[in-house]
Amino acid sequence: MLMGYISCFGKILFLSCLLSSCREQEPSVTFVFTGDLMPDRGIRTAIGQKGMEPLFRNLPYDLHGVDYTVANLECAVCDSGIQKVNKRFAFRANPDWLPDFGKHGINIVSVANNHSGDCGESGLLQTLAYVRRADMYAVGANANPEWVGAPLVISRGKIRIALFSSSLLKADSRYMCHVPVAALIKRIHTYKEGHPGTVILLLLHWGVEGKSKPESGQVQDAHNLIDAGVDVLLGTHPHVVQPVEHYKNGLIFYSLGNFIFDNNRPPEDRGLMVRLAIGQGHVVAMDTVSFHVFSGYGR
C-alpha cells in the first residue's frame, strides 16, 4: 500500500509545511510539470489543420505564469531526411514547431525516453540542436556522452535546484541517460553530498503502459531514490495517471500520464499537471490538477 497517498483527480493542494503569511512571501522558483508531449500522428494532423493554438487553449494552468514548464518530449525532432528506426511506433516532430511550443510556455523538455531515439542517434543529436535553437533546455541527453547524466542546474539567489532525467527503458544510445536505479541512486547521493541545500528533482521514464498503479519494485525504487536525496520524483511512460505519494520529506508522482497525445480513450485521456514553488533548500508549496488531454482527432 502506498504511504501518504494523495488523491490525484480533481484539484488538490499540498503544502510542504504550514505556511505563515511571511513564508508565503518567501522567494521561490516556480515550475509546472506535465506528462508526455507527442506531436505526431493525430496531433500532427490537428496542427496542420488548425495550428498550434488549440493544443494550449484549455490548459488548467497559465504556463506563462511560472518560471519553467517541463514536458516529456516523446519523439525525435529532426529533418524528414533522417530515416526512422524499425519499430512498431516511431515518432518524429517538425522542428519548426519547437519555437511555437516555447512561445506557449514550454522551456524545458526531457529527452530521456523510449522515443527520443526513434530516428537513431543522428535524429537525437538533431533534436538536441533544435531544442537549443528554440531557446529551450533539454535534460536526459547530451551531445557529449561524458555529460549525459549531468543535471540541469537552476540558481536564483540562494536557491539551488538540480533537475535530473533518466529512462529505465531500453535505449541504445550513448547520448541518452538510461542508467539502472542503483547507479542513479549512487549518482544522486554523491551529488547531494557535494551540493548540500540543493533541491533535487528527478524526471524518470519508467513503469508499465496502461497500469493504473506502480509495480511494487517501483515503489521501493522510489523510496530508495528519496532516501538518496531526491526531493521530488516525477514519472512518465505509462500514459495514465498513477497515484501520488508523500514519502518522508519527498514527493513521488509515479506517472503524470499524457499532456498532448493523440489518444482520446479513457484513462489515457487524462493527465496530471504539477505546479511547484521551490525555495532555499525545500519545496515551499505544491498543487496539482487533473485535466483532459488534448488529443486532436484521436486514433
Image (cartoon, grey):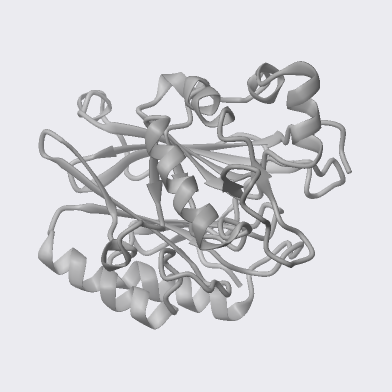
Q: Identify the residue shown where x is 52% and y is 72%.
A: 168
Left or right placement of residue 204 versus residue 147 in this view: right
**Residue 298 versus residue 3: which sits nearer the camera?**
298
Question: 46 above or below 232?
Answer: above
Left or right placement of residue 291 versus residue 218 in this view: right
**Residue 172 versus residue 263: which sits nearer the camera?**
172
Question: 70 above or below 76?
Answer: above
Quarter holding residue 243: bottom right
- Residue 296 appears at what percent x and percent y? 80, 31
- Residue 277 appears at what percent x and percent y? 34, 35
- Residue 61 appears at what percent x and percent y? 54, 24
**Residue 107 versus residue 48: which sits nearer the camera?**
48
Left or right placement of residue 269 versus residue 214 in this view: right
Q: Can residue 286 be seen in the rendering of this structure?
A: no
Question: 150 above or below 37?
Answer: below
Q: Residue farthest to the front?
A: 81
Q: Can residue 97 be seen in the rendering of this structure?
A: yes
Q: Identify the residue shown where x is 61% and y is 72%.
A: 1
> What is the total number of numbered labels drawn onto the structure image?
0
Left or right placement of residue 230 versus residue 252 in this view: left
Quadrant where the image shows the C terminus: top right
Quarter holding residue 21: top left
Q: Identify the residue shown where x is 66% and y is 46%.
A: 92
Question: 220 above or below 289?
Answer: below
- Residue 160 appears at what percent x and percent y? 18, 45
